[in-house]
Image (cartoon, coloured by chain):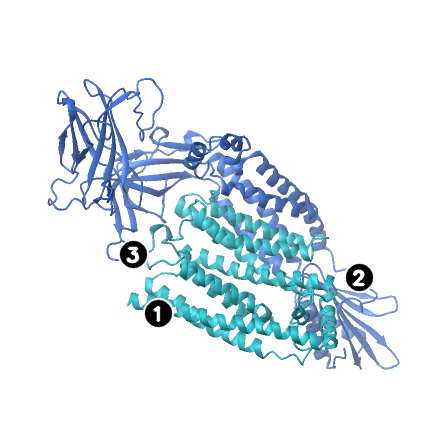
Amino acid sequence: MTDLLVSSSLTAVWSAMGVYTLAFIMFTLDLAKRSAWAQQAPVAVTAATSAMGQLAGATATIDRINTDTAVKPLSLKFERIAFALTVLGWLVHTAAVVMRGIAQGYVPWSNMFEFSLTASSIIVGVFIAVQVWQNLRFLGAFITGFALIALGLATVNFYVDVKPLPPALQSSWLVIHVFVAVLGTSFFALGAGLSVVQLMQARAAAAKGAGLKFLQTLPGADALENLAYRVVVVGFVFWTFTLIAGAIWAERAWGRYWGWDTKEVWTFIIWTIFAGYLHARATRGWRGSRSAWLAIIGFAAVLFNFTVVNLFFKGLHAYSGL
Amino acid sequence: MRTALFLLLLLAIAAVPGSLVPQRSSDPNGVQQYFTNNPEIAPVLDTLQAFDVYTSAWFSAIYLLLFISLIGCVVPRTAHHYRALRSAPPKTPARLSRLAGFTTAWAPGVSATDAVESARGILKKSGYRVRLFEGPRGELSVSAERGYLRETGNLVFHTALVGVLVSVGIGGSFGYSGQKVIVEGDSFANVLLSYESFLPGRFFDEGVLQPYRLTLDEFEAVYEQENPAARGQPIDFTASVTSYAPGSEVGTRAEIKVNDPLRLGGNDIFLLGNGYAPIITVRDGEGNVAFSDAVPFLPQDGNLTSIGVVKVPDAVPEQIGMIGFLYPTQATLTTGALTSNYPDLLNPVLSLQVFTGDLGLDGGIPRSVYSLDTDGMTEIAGRTADAPPIQLTPGETVELPDGIGSVTFENAAPSAPADDLTGSVPRFVSLDIHRDPSQGWVLAFAILVLAGLLTSLFIPRRRVWVKAIDDGDAGGVRLEYAGLARGEDPTLDRAVREIADRHSQQLGIRLTT
């Protein structure tokens, strides 16, 4: 039974990767289509961007900026197909996570393979859920691409067989601490994606419309900055909780709540970078591109913490399973 | 803000080296290793305090400056916020049209007083603090403000961070941590001398040690047996102990597990490690028992290949020293070397290198019980000696070369069937014993940090105004609505619109925007 579940889970992972690949292609086709459309209809675009500029110019008015109401003729067929594929891929992906969890009888995030598997599922899940609040589908290529890389690394480089849970991880904090860390990571990922687009937008604006054409169909740099901020703030709260929950667990498992273990150091560094990001928002001269860079550096540190610190640094969080 | 931002980013960068270089606080052996591997760079790094980054002068300087700037910011803000909490909302601006969410409406047949009164009611119900004004041309208005909790949360967040820092400092100064190795059947009395290693805080006072006793009755390790991918992986460690309150002979039974410490006598007792402690008896050349004890062997790998040292200073005619390898389940590698391929005692073998000569114990220099200085000794059985290393199974005795005596690997469970050796070697546990008087405070402040963060990020602080300008000729009033964000407030426009909607509904008019 365990073997069947494990192999079905892997089959589901590969299937999800197939669907995500299609979604990724569709999302990039959508961006290409947007570029083509932007070139054909320069007048409409100017109207659209100026409308969005007005929205963004007011004091943080960023509710439901509809990228497609101002400019109707833009067909979003590819985007719709891509998003539907993302949802489908995510369902298969989540099924893989659940089967892996049932197969081993505990939460599927106790080693690097499972963590990549589950974290990428939650990241895509958050991306899908966030659409209810705000249309961020233009990040689809970024998110599906990210999930594809994570799943590829997980299955090819990080794969380990189902094993019993070692005594150090036998705690309900494994469920809470790690899950919230993943949630935080998801929001940081979205924030980083938005910040990247924001930087591209700022550069395009500085170059007076040069650069990638599809940018003209997306919200302006200011609106993106506000969106990124709202997403990152949520991530920051989750990250703070992760830090505190981790300290409580460390006290129970290792006898001290804080010991500057390499993983603790990097969690602290990430927290500090994002604390800096929050302050940058309120500092003259640091709004805009500089704070966007901080959000990107912060997310890069998250990725570094998961990959390089796990694999190459010595520490107590030695749960990669590799 | 600029200072805080600069110091925060500096702190993030300053924390990095501590993850690249081993730290004395978390990995003292790694530091030693680093000195051996990099004899040239290590002393240079050491002068830069790179092995004690988090207590270094430069790291401390950054976070102390950060906290000074934090306090310098929080104190005046607290005073300012205290005044704001006690004062009414400010006067309505003369022109609302330039403010966020500006909305107007025409209300025929409504008096300005009624309109403002109903707006006041709506705002008050929505949690606003309200105040009525009369403008220079007789226009009435409500000035309203809400979300004072945002700033309160922000101040709580920052103050609680100071609280965390202070309580961490206090805990580190008054607390202590010590390590103790206990073999099954042995006891530990909580006095300073019993500890193998002890790290006191700056203001540690020996009087806080409560002299309780703790006996390790049994240590049980469960290993995976069926799953081929994880054979030998530990599934559970349980130390069964009996504790005795100071001066008491009545014991209390308890269990210590990896994620489940024992709280006893103001201490937290953690199960951090375990291994085997084979009982070794050495008889000297005259047949006298010169040594007989359980010797903790330090595990070297997951299958518990373990190394230990036996020192027999009382052997006659010469002192005897032995370096031992214990293989719980002995197997032979293709190279011919011995190894262990399972952590439990399925086929235990003890291999000993034997030395004679001066153990170096009489010079008064403290020596580790886990290492043998063979400089003044001659190897009589082992790799460089004529005789091969001595190999023993539980219960076996072997004569040492040159008639200097014999060594016995005692079977701790001699009555067990011959093919069951699982009880033949006692186990030991290594316990971490801590006292941190302030960790409850750290937790309390950490919770305040989180609570403060949530309120300061998600409660919007905003001002809203509703103005009613009498238009005597037409018999009605012109209503104006507008808001002002104080801090991040992405939903301000919607909020103003909702208030305008509710107000117009109450007045029975239609909004014209």
Question: Which residue type carries mark 1?
Answer: Ser
Q: Residue furthest front?
A: B335
- Residue B56 seen from this side: yes
- Name the residue tied to disc 2: B91
Residue B246 on image: x %, y %: 32, 34
Q: Pointer 2 and pointer 1: residues touching (CB < 8 Å)?
A: no
The Cα atoms of the two marked residues, 2 and 3, are separated by 74 Å
Rendered colour, chain B: blue
Callout 3: helix, strand or loop? helix
Q: Amino acid at mark 2?
A: Lys
Asked whether the residues under marks 2 and 1 belong to the same chain, the reply is: no
Residue A129 versus residue B180: which sits nearer the camera?
A129
Q: Quadrant of residue A174?
A: bottom left
Look at 28% across and 22% down and name the residue there.
B359
Residue B30 in the figure: left or right of residue B343: right
Q: Compare residues B268 and A211 and report the one nearer the observer.
A: A211
Task: Tell me whether marks 2 and 3 sit on the same chain.
Answer: yes
Query: Which residue position is annotated with label 1?
Result: A8
Q: Nearer the viewer, mark 2 or mark 3?
A: 3
SS label for mark 2: loop
